[in-house]
Amino acid sequence: MQDSAQESLSLVCGDASSEGGITSVSDQDRARQEISDDAAKARKDVNDSFVRAGLLLTELAIGTLLKRGLKPGEVIGLAQEKGTFLVTKEFIEEFFPKKESEQEFSFVIRKGAQPLSSKIDSQLEIDDTRDITGKSTSEGTVDNFMELFRDRYKRLKAILSNRAVLKDSIDLENLKRYDGQEVKAIGMVREKRESKKGNIILEIEDPTGSASAIAMSDLKEKATLIVRDEVIGVVGSVRGNFILARELIEPDIPTTRPKPECDEPVSVAFLSDIHVGSLLFMEKEFQRFLDWLNLQGNGNQREVAERIKYVLIAGDLVDGIGIYPGQESELAIPDIYKQYDYFGKLIQAIPDYIEVIVSVGNHDAVRRCEPQPSLAGFADSLDAPNIHLVGNPAKLKIHGYEALMYHGTSMDALISVMPKLSYNNPEAAQVEYLKKRHLSPVYGTKEQIAPEEKDYMVIDSVPDILHCGHVHKNGYANYRGVRIINSGTWQSQTDFQQQQGHIPTPCKVPILDLESMALKVVNFA
């Protein structure tokens, strides 16, 4: 663009050293100003024509329209026909395509100098045992559901049984034998309710039977944090088929544990909820992020960019098709295949020495039920040696650090049943995942879980990093040594979010330095 402008100046001004050329600096400045004024007037004229038609036009769309020499009236007519009030660059490229040989995307791959991390060997391990891709056997039968809950109970009971306070727990079918005595029991919460006296009653069950655990006095507050379908431990005295609880114990994670160390200058960048194809996808800002990864210029936090060796993307790569009623009117790219093609072109602009791990979310073109398989075989544009497609959730090891990546759809259910949680602080919901050792502790409310033989949402081993997205809000915490990160979004505020009073935090990229475990956030907005 700069070369083009300079060429235009030469045509207007001539060569300053040649005979008859303009030699005074003031004359050259005036010539530049005239060109700038003309360009500004052209952009204003185009914008005004759309405003008069009751439409909005993005800055990138104006540039595309002028560059392509399109007539504003043609674009306005089609936008009105499609019911689109905001015309974006993607809209123009979708409905006014160039000839096949001239097709191009608006972003530019600009390569910079070789950074520190390019000289460091990748240390990436993807745990296939935690990935559902190619392994689903569920037919949705009653037996499948029973297998799922039995597996959940068995594995979470094993975690709880390692707690000293729950050694020698009894089977619930034997509860009445211990009438008047103190017992230890482990069960899954079937129901939670409040008694007439204001106590919390937890109906729990195990494979052998059921019982009612009553939380009174100071224990009531703890009981309010327990959710249905969670597996818990109960210590208390038996009264018939009731346990008067003295303690309620969640699986939780250890307070201390060995921590890995990294002695190389490598960092991880965390992304999610990019929503390519949406009218609200913040393309210009994402281009700025890509330029930054390629070390363009001497701008903000260059020394941080030089250390990035991994990029983790936790789902909702595209806006999808048919996710909610009326979505088609909010799409700049209404074709799901073209959405992924565009996303792939963007991701291919990431330097090839950076390992990119791509998961999926509820907007992506895989099954809606969790756990979700990867996009393998669906998006050819993501076929590159440094791009790794994984399911949701996914478990990784990066330079010795275990990372658990989950899109976070179950936060909707968790936030709805736990008054202390909110969309403004997603990190608090992620702490609850760790306390309950499960990524979707509440079954069958807002999210959908496929009844597989194995419950892929159980958190067996404690991660060093827990990365989520979904709620479009950045959030960070450190819970018992686990780095908790919610990576926000690249989509500006939607109408629905505005109605709900939810303010997203777009274009803020958390960067974790594995050598120091220091977290920085780089804002590309």
Image (cartoon, rainbow, N blue to C red):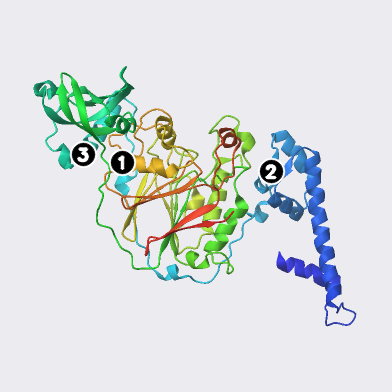
Callout 2: SS: helix
Query: What residue is pinned by disc 1?
Result: 435
Give the amino acid at mark 2.
Answer: Phe
Residue 418 vertical placement versus 394 (above, below): above
Residue nearest the viewer, comparing 232 with 370: 232
Mark earlier in primary sequence (1, 2): 2
Mark earlier in primary sequence (1, 3): 3
Callout 1: SS: helix
CB atoms at circles 2 and 3 under 8 Å apart? no
Outermost residue toward the left in this view: 177
Badge 3: residue crowd in 10 Å (few <14, some 14–19, many ≥20): many
Q: CA distance from mark 2 to mark 3?
A: 58 Å
Return the mark for residue 95.
Answer: 2
Relative horizontal placement of residue 226, taking residue 329 as reference (left or right)? left
Outermost residue toward the top in this view: 196
Percent position (x, y) of residue 456?
A: 32, 40
- Quarter where residue 346 is shown: bottom right
